[in-house]
Image: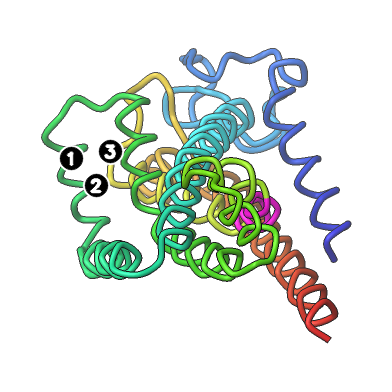
Amino acid sequence: MARICLVTLAFLIALCFLGPLLTPYNPHSPDWNALSVRPGVGGHWFGTDAIGRDVFARTLAGGRLSLMIGLLSSVIALLIGVTFGAVAGLAGGRIESAMVRVLDVFSALPFLLVVILLLTLFDRSLGLMLAAIGGYVWIDLARVMRAEAARLREAPFVLASQATGSRFSERLRWHVIPNLLPLALVYLGLILPQAILVESFLGFLGLSIDEPSASWGSLLAEGVQELDTAPWTLIFPAIFLVLTLVVFQFLGDSLSDSLDVRAESAAT
């Protein structure tokens, strides 16, 4: 299953990023002579929208934007979650308890509503979008990293390093974080589809990057408005979004199962 997911994901990514080589149409340029053309007519594989923009080109362009925002925001979440969890788990005691309470407070907040409020009050930009989504998806990752770091805190090589007089930052940098990275990269496959889904939801609400750029969520919002006259403007972006999320979900589940099996083998 993991191999099938990887092949499918590689195909989708290559299709989105090599899209300009596959179609002569500009995703942002309207063609007033080809309004709401059906799929397959006039060289428009996925048809056109109400102002003549090629849906195939716009779907691939939207995929590039959604994948880029999802990946970059997931990397931000990875940096925050690994650092926070590693510090909490290695410190232990009252510091760990206080940091866990901070996670509990963040988990209780309606974080998605906070993100919507930030994007509504301030000018929408790529940096704000990445920070908002990354700040939303890091919490669960930090919990996992904290638990793993707490286990590593009692590992013989960490105790030996502490006995030799190494500082907290040295143990964190040389012993804990390097051993957390494999698990963190596995969870990256779980938080990345969550980040893409959040971005698509924000795009559907009109809170994503401003025009002429359009993510899959923005395309879905446009497709809903044209559902009666040109349903293909909704169907094709929805297929790409759902297929991407499903592939990431199965890939994350496969990696998690593999990690659990290895953990059980190591324990026995």
As helix, strand or loop, the secondary structure at mark 2 comes to helix
Residue 115 image label: 2
Residue 226, picture quadrant: top left
Q: In terms of secondary structure, where does tag 1 sit?
A: helix
Closer to the camera, 185 or 264? 264
Mark toward the start of the polypeptide (3 vs 2): 2
Residue at point 75% right, 46% down? 9
Q: Which residues are magenta?
A: 179-188
Query: Do callouts 2 and 1 mark residues in contact (Cβ within 8 Å)?
Result: yes
| Left or right: 83 in relation to 175 | left
- Name the residue tied to disc 3: 207
Which x, y percent locates residue 167?
49, 43
Q: Would residue 259 appear left or right of 72 to someone viewing this image?
A: right
Secondary structure mainly formed by the magenta segment? helix
In this orientation, which residue lies closer to the viewer: 117 or 225? 117
42, above or below 108, in the image: above
Question: Where on the picture, by quarter, is residue 180?
Answer: bottom right
Please give the name of the residue rendered at 51% of the width and 23% of the height, measured from the top-left corner.
53
Please give the label number shown on residue 118: 1
Determine if residue 229 is in view: no
